[in-house]
Image: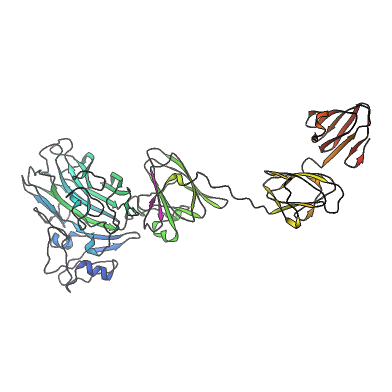
Amino acid sequence: MARDRSVADDDSTDADGPRRSTTDNGIDRRSYLKLTGTAAALAAGAGAATGTVSAASEVDWIELDYDQYSSPDDVYHYTSGNGSYGFTPSDRDDGQVLSIHTERNRNTNQNVSYDILQDGYDAPKAVYQSIDVKCGESMTFNATGDNVRFLNAGINIQWGDAHSGVDGPPSGDDGWSVRLYVYDHDGNSSGPFGLNVYSYHMDRRASSGESDVVRSDIFRPGEWQRVETYIEMNTISNGQANADGLVRVWVDGEEVYHRDDFRWTTEPQQAHQLLGPVMRYGGSEVAPRDTDIYYDNHRIAVGGLPEDRDGGSGGFDYDAHDNVVPPSQSDQYEERFSFRNGDSASEYTLYVDGEIVQSDWGRASYNETVSVREEGEYAVVEATAGPGTYDGFYFNGDIVAMAFDPYPERAWRGPADGAGDDVVTFDDYPESPPEPEESLDNTILIDGIGTVGGTDYEFTVSGAAEASNYRGATVNDADTVDGGTVTGSVGGWRDAFVFSGELEDLSVDGPARVSVNDERVDPAEYGDGSSSTLTIVGNGTESVYEITVDGTIEPDDDTSADVTSNSADSVSGTIERGVHRLQITGELVDLTYVEGGTHTYLDKERIR
């Protein structure tokens, strides 16, 4: 899409504010664009120069083609200062480039900046720019540590003077700035020179800005070099600024600066405003020689990283990767989650009770180790995050658990449209999801109605069990439920239980009938076989016996004092009077009376 920049007959410049251009009908450019929208084309007035804004999949492009203009004032809104500037013939083609000039021994401060708010953008949160820069061959400095500002990466002067430290550092609603300087780090008077990123932000306690010296050997006087900047505003939670504002700087395609903990604003409307060329010798410093800084091919992307810059969407084939979507599909998801990893690689797992996909908005980038699988009712992400990297995900449903080893420096969660992320407190999430509640959808009924005498029973299931009133059964407090094992007894009534899993073992001693899911069952079909009672009746003469089974044998409580357990399947005992009862599973293998002998019963059947 194209926009025409209309040049008014009467342009004004305010030293304290942006320079405005008006269309021929008297509506200022900002108002006109707000009426027509950022995708509109402005009709050019007579003699108007042409500027182009095109929309990529994620950003609006503002292309500043100097060859289409007669003066920098037709290109840039904010041209305040005490220096001189203008277009001059290019030394690399037949076009023209922008030059900002300072004279020897002069403390020059000259802005030639672009005000994106004048193009109708309403508080853009992310802005990228790319510009070719050449420091003049005569550039030098008087002393080590001297510098000259050459590019505004981002400044907001609309909200107040804290962008330059007037009355102290920014407080969140009074301006902010990030500026780039050519810096004499090593005292090398002829270069190469270093880069200094200078910022006014809320965590700077002094009225001066914070200086981040990047490298000492970046800028080479007399050579064209490509400089790119990207600023993403910090997020805001409950009126408080989160420390996640991002600044990235590239020189000749190499990322030389990346910092992501800035706090500039507590006001959503205080966002980007000015960016672009500037010449400002720092503090009271002066230029030791007449010199120029040259600029060409200035391009601005509003709304995010452009397609041809790493971290943006360009060149990445989303269709060739599973579970990865571009940021343009964020409207298909409810929330997003991202984190900044620390200095060590981190293995992590996320559990979501819906769907989750990877994406690369803002600082997040594609992580090839990410895998997404289904595990029951959860979508499970497993991956390894590299040192200092950002991973990002869109998801529907809820994050029910997360585990990191080690945990990252910080994580954020918020609406998928980026309306406001909150810092994640890791302690709020378990490292694994809760165990799913088992469905007790099976029934077992021990029916003693119509029988004579009592029936003891015991059964084991592979899941859980609990007493039930199924088919009029009573809930007997004397019955015991221990995990999946149930022990009880019935007389002329019914006991019932609901359970999950499978019935693994069933022992019944007595005439009661057993049904599982309303189907009559034979206890002998479960476990090691049926449970039987071996009864030995004393006759007044001492008898000594030995018994072996192919399952288990255990005396009841009244008998245990007179019986010795040789092993799980073998006992020996002595009886003279009374009754010995022993519970056995499996088959009776051997019954031997070493001394004497007496009546012996297996359940109701006499076997001796």
Colouring of the image? rainbow
Above or below, comparing residue 506 to residue 61 in the picture: above
Q: Residue furthest bottom?
A: 25
Residue at image x 14%, y 70%?
47
Question: Where does the image place residue 248, in percent across and percent down from the top left?
Answer: 29, 48
**Res 84 → quadrant:** bottom left
Magenta-highlighted residues? 405-422
Residue at image x 77%, y 56%?
518
Q: How many marks are shown on the rendered structure?
A: 0
Taking 597 as reference, is 376 left or right? left
Observer-nearest of 487 and 157:
487
Question: Where does the image place residue 290, in percent across and percent down from the top left?
Answer: 7, 46
Question: Where does the image place residue 223, in percent across and percent down from the top left?
Answer: 18, 46
Q: Quick one: quadrant of the C terminus?
A: top right
408 magenta-colored: yes
Observer-nearest of 467 and 133:
467
Is residue 505 shown to the viewer in this render? Answer: no
Observer-nearest of 233 and 22:
233
Q: Residue furthest top?
A: 595
Question: Where does the image place residue 395, in percent across and percent down from the top left?
Answer: 46, 55
Taking 357 as reference, is 259 left or right? left
Q: Quick one: quadrant of the N terminus?
A: bottom left
29 magenta-colored: no
Residue at image x 44%, y 46%?
368
Taking 534 as reference, is 240 left or right? left
Is residue 599 shown to the viewer in this render? Answer: yes
Above or below, comparing residue 535 to residue 240 in the picture: above
